[in-house]
Image: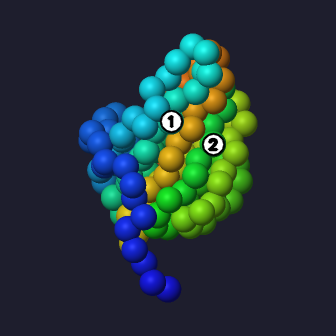
């Protein structure tokens, strides 16, 4: 399959290694949070192997994959493989992580909804063992 760079947003700032492991992630805020729409949108780019910590969103989150191959996993469930064009609906308080496949950069829009209820609650890193055993 032909691959091409479909990223239309700047790569943004390096994300904190407190919340990402296995490589570097970049975050560009596309739409800042506000108290009327209660919505924040970020563009997140993960290096191959990079993933975020286990976490949840009190207001929920929608992921729209724009390039590469990656994973989404909810606690206690098998990981889902994600490709560009995939959309993931994450209900409030569901513990999960998302990130790149070992051999692919991965980019998604992260739409944080109902931000009046909170944006993100970070938990522990996804261990190498958890990541390798997907
Ligand atoms: Mn999330």
Among numbered discs 2 and 1, the one appearing first in the sequence: 1
Q: Is residue 131 visible?
A: no
- List x then y, in percent, for residue 48: 36, 63
Q: Residues within 10 Å of mark 2 (few under 14, many from 20)?
A: some
Q: Is residue 95 above or below residue 4?
A: above
Q: Residue at x 42, y 47 (%)?
A: 44
Q: What whole-number distance in Å separates the C-alpha atoms at marks 2 and 1? A: 9 Å
Q: Residue at x 42, y 78 (%)?
A: 3
Q: Is residue 46 above or below residue 59?
A: below
Q: Is residue 16 above or below residue 89?
A: above
Residue 41 - label: 1
Disc 1 beta carbon < 8 A from ligand 1?
A: no
Q: Secondary structure at mark 1?
A: strand
**What residue sits right under mark 2 in the picture?**
62
Q: Is residue 3 visible?
A: yes
Q: Secondary structure at mark 2?
A: strand
- List x then y, in percent, for residue 77: 71, 53
Residue 121, by quadrant, is: top right
């Amino acid at each position: 399959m032909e691959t091409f760079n479909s990223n239309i947003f700047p790569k943004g700032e390096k994300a904190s290694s407190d919340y990402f492991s296995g490589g570097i992630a970049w975050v560009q805020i596309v739409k800042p949070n506000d108290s009327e729409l209660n919505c924040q949108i970020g563009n997140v780019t993960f290096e191959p192997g990079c993933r975020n910590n286990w976490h949840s969103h009190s207001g929920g989150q929608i992921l729209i994959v724009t390039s590469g191959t990656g994973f989404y996993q909810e606690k206690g469930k098998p990981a889902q493989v994600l490709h560009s064009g995939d959309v993931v609906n994450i209900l409030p308080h569901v513990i999960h992580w998302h990130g790149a496949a070992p051999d692919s950069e991965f980019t998604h829009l992260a739409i944080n909804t109902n931000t009046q209820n909170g944006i993100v609650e970070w938990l522990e890193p996804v261990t190498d063992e958890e990541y390798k055993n997907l």
